Image (spheres, rainbow, N blue to C red):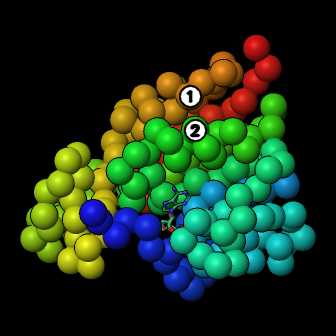
Amino acid sequence: MTKHATAIARKGPSTPMLDVYASGVLAGPVLDFGCGVGADVAWLREEGIKAEGYDPNTTEFKKFPRRKFKTVLCTYVLNVVQAPKEVLVAAWERVAVGGCLFVTCRSDTDVNYAARKGGWLAIGKGWVNSRGSYQKGYTEKELVKLCTALPSHSLAVYATKVHGNPMVVVRKVRL
Ligand SMILES: C[S@@+](CC[C@H](N)C(=O)[O-])C[C@H]1O[C@@H](n2cnc3c(N)ncnc32)[C@H](O)[C@@H]1O
């Protein structure tokens, strides 16, 4: 088994979240799904936006939220899990009708470069790095495909890139 489950200690807010915020489309309440130590949650709260975090590998954000959110962020989470569909569906279920899910992953170029340079071990569709953590990079096409398969609602998928990393925005609409 790989240790893909470790929460990371980000010092400041993430670029994907800042980009979404700067574009003016980030509506609260916000759920940061796979929030790590909660740097984005803290930043959003300081901006006066209602924000909660969920991360099963932390003490502070362990509690799974039951309510729905206008915005759900899922930043650099799918690239560390070996069952991305399950995690994506769990995040999608927390999106309120009319709300959006923003999914950002490390790009395949970035991860494959790091893997070759670091001599990572190939496992399934991804790699295990020197710390024993799983990593799998995504192309924009792969991420769009994963999001397009989300159940229950029709989707509008907009793909964009944050520093070469694909971000897909999925809106939940009533059928
Ligand atoms: C690379 S970190 C990104 C953390 C944060 N989103 C950020 O950008 O700083 C990946 C995070 O995914 C979390 N994670 C792993 N499995 C998860 C799951 N099944 N559901 C939600 N989060 C998960 C890990 O605990 C870790 O904190």
User: Residue 82 in the image: x percent, y percent?
Assistant: 35, 50
Q: Quadrant of the C terminus?
A: top right
Q: Secondary structure at mark 2?
A: helix
Kindly identify which numbered label has been placed on residue 89: 2
Tag 2 near tag 1, CB within 8 Å: yes
Residue type at numbered disc 1:
Leu
Near mark 2 (Cα within 10 A), the count class, few <14, some 14-19 or many ≥20, is some
Kindly identify which numbered label has been placed on residue 150: 1
Near mark 1 (Cα within 10 A), the count class, few <14, some 14-19 or many ≥20, is some
CA gap between label 2 and label 1 equals: 7 Å
Mark with earlier residue (2, 1): 2
Instruction: Farthest residue to the front: give it.
Output: 1
Name the residue located 71 percent from the left edge and 58 percent from the top edge.
64
User: Residue 140 in the image: x percent, y percent?
Assistant: 39, 39
Residue 49 relative to residue 3: left or right: right
Q: Is mark 2 within 8 Å of ligand 1?
A: no
Name the residue located 50 percent from the left edge and 52 percent from the top edge.
104
Name the residue located 87 percent from the left edge and 63 percent from the top edge.
50
